Image (tube, grey):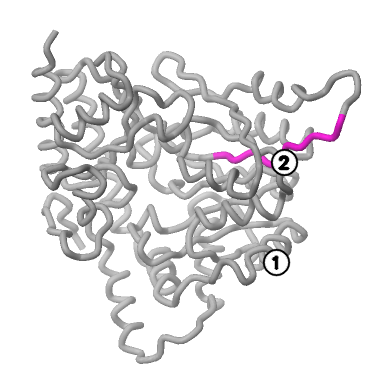
């Protein structure tokens, strides 16, 4: 089946956060929303058909993951990443963000510390602080337009509190984001191994958010952190989901892969009574996506590559004062707007009121995000082109 991703579909008045919250978020309706990670592209037909069939069965009671659903996850890990997982390792949650909160709670006591790599997906912050824990920032380094991990600083985080009278470390986890949101880096095997060995040395669990792992641009291949070695497997909580890949965020379905039996039981015990399981339509969509969504996904990735190529050329030729940090994964683009010479609130107002585009402000992602904006390019190309034209006109109208 050939999908028409160029067609613009009206999502207003469908309880869509992205389009029905324009005035409350951006102050007025004449804004192109390109912030939240939600595609303005149609879902794969086999998923729609599967949901219709399930809806026709007129019972919507309490549900659980069937053996077929679990097997779909197991098979997906092998087919996409050559990672052989066991069915019992899979825990289902209604989203990755709730799972991150559960993971922090299960590993910590108030006052403990969690390492983040800023600028990073902003729900990471309350996942730490709402549990009474402290954030340690292992800030990423931007070197020649490419972000790198700072391993020297990472080691320093573990040794900073060690003096004449050593005390046990209160660092309980490193929260990894791969591909990294918002900067788009896909961490390679060597980078992951180096981070993993540091975590093992200091008895620190790696909580790995890999929700964008199938949204990769040409020439890139994702490596699940836990797939690198048995030791890493036993020291990791891997968070994945079809929600970003197949545009299913409204159905609330995620797969948390926890090979370590003790960690897995602790996770399920912590979520009991706090976090419900996914709903039956989420399970249905997951199975249909993993079993029958490949044709759609291949077309989607080609289209996103086309959008990225179009955007890269447009900025280089026509909006050179804004630099694009070229992503390797996700459909999110990190824009370096520092040459515009604006503080963060002025930049926000400029984008919303002058350019009339709705981005995520870079400062929301923590240290290193000031002067940046995050842009979602998973939309029909005519919408992308209009947004770029608006930005170009606004930038050209800035008085020197």
Circles 2 and 1: CB distance less than 8 Å?
A: no
How many C-alpha atoms fall within 10 Å of the one at disc 1: few (<14), some, or many (≥20)? few
Query: Is 216 in front, or is 173?
Result: 173
Which residue is the site of mark 2? 112
- Residue 349: image location, x then y, percent: 22, 30
Mark 2–mark 1 distance (CA, rounded to whole Å): 20 Å
Q: Nearer the viewer, residue 347 or 294?
A: 347
Residue of label 1: 269
Q: Which residue is drawn at 12% across and 36% down?
A: 385
Q: In this view, does 207 lie to the left or right of 385?
A: right
Query: Quarter of the image holding residue 86?
Result: bottom right
Q: In what quadrant of the picture does the N terminus appear?
A: bottom left
Q: What kind of secondary structure does the magenta stretch mostly adopt? A: strand
What segment carries the magenta color? 167-176
Q: Residue 168: within the magenta?
A: yes
**Counting residues from the N terminus, which is met first, the one under dot 2 or under dot 1?**
2
């Amino acid at each position: 089946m050939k999908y028409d991703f160029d067609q613009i579909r009206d999502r207003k008045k469908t309880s869509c956060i992205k389009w029905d919250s324009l005035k409350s978020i951006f102050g007025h309706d004449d804004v192109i929303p390109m912030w939240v990670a939600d595609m303005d592209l149609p879902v794969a037909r086999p998923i729609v058909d599967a949901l219709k069939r399930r809806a026709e069965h007129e019972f919507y009671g309490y549900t659980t993951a069937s053996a077929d659903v679990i097997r779909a996850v197991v098979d997906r890990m092998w087919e996409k990443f050559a990672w052989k997982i066991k069915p019992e390792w899979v825990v289902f949650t209604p989203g990755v963000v709730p799972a991150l909160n559960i993971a922090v709670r299960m590993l910590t006591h108030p006052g403990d510390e969690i390492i983040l790599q800023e600028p990073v997906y902003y729900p990471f912050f309350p996942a730490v602080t709402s549990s009474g824990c402290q954030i340690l920032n292992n800030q990423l380094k931007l070197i020649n337009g490419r972000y790198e991990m700072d391993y020297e600083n990472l080691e320093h985080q573990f040794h900073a509190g060690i003096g004449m009278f050593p005390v046990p470390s209160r660092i309980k986890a490193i929260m990894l984001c791969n591909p990294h949101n918002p900067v788009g880096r896909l961490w390679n095997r060597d980078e992951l191994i180096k981070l993993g060995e540091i975590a093992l040395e200091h008895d620190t669990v790696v909580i790995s958010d890999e929700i964008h792992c199938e949204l990769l641009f040409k020439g890139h291949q994702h490596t699940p952190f836990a797939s690198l070695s048995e030791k890493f497997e036993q020291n990791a909580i891997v968070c994945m989901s079809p929600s970003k890949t197949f545009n299913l965020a409204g159905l609330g379905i995620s797969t948390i892969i926890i090979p370590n039996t003790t960690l897995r039981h602790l996770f399920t015990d912590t979520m009991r009574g706090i976090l419900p399981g996914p709903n039956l339509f989420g399970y249905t969509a997951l199975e249909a996506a993993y079993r029958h969504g490949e044709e759609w996904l291949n077309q989607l990735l080609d289209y996103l590559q086309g959008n990225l190529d179009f955007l890269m050329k447009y900025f280089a030729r026509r909006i050179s004062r804004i630099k694009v940090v070229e992503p390797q994964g996700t459909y999110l683009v990190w824009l370096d707007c520092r040459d515009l010479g604006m503080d963060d609130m002025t930049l926000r107002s400029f984008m919303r009121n002058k350019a009339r585009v709705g981005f995520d402000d870079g400062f929301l992602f923590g240290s290193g995000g000031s002067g940046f904006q995050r842009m979602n390019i998973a939309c029909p190309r005519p919408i992308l082109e209009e947004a770029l034209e608006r930005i170009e006109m606004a930038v050209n109208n800035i008085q020197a």
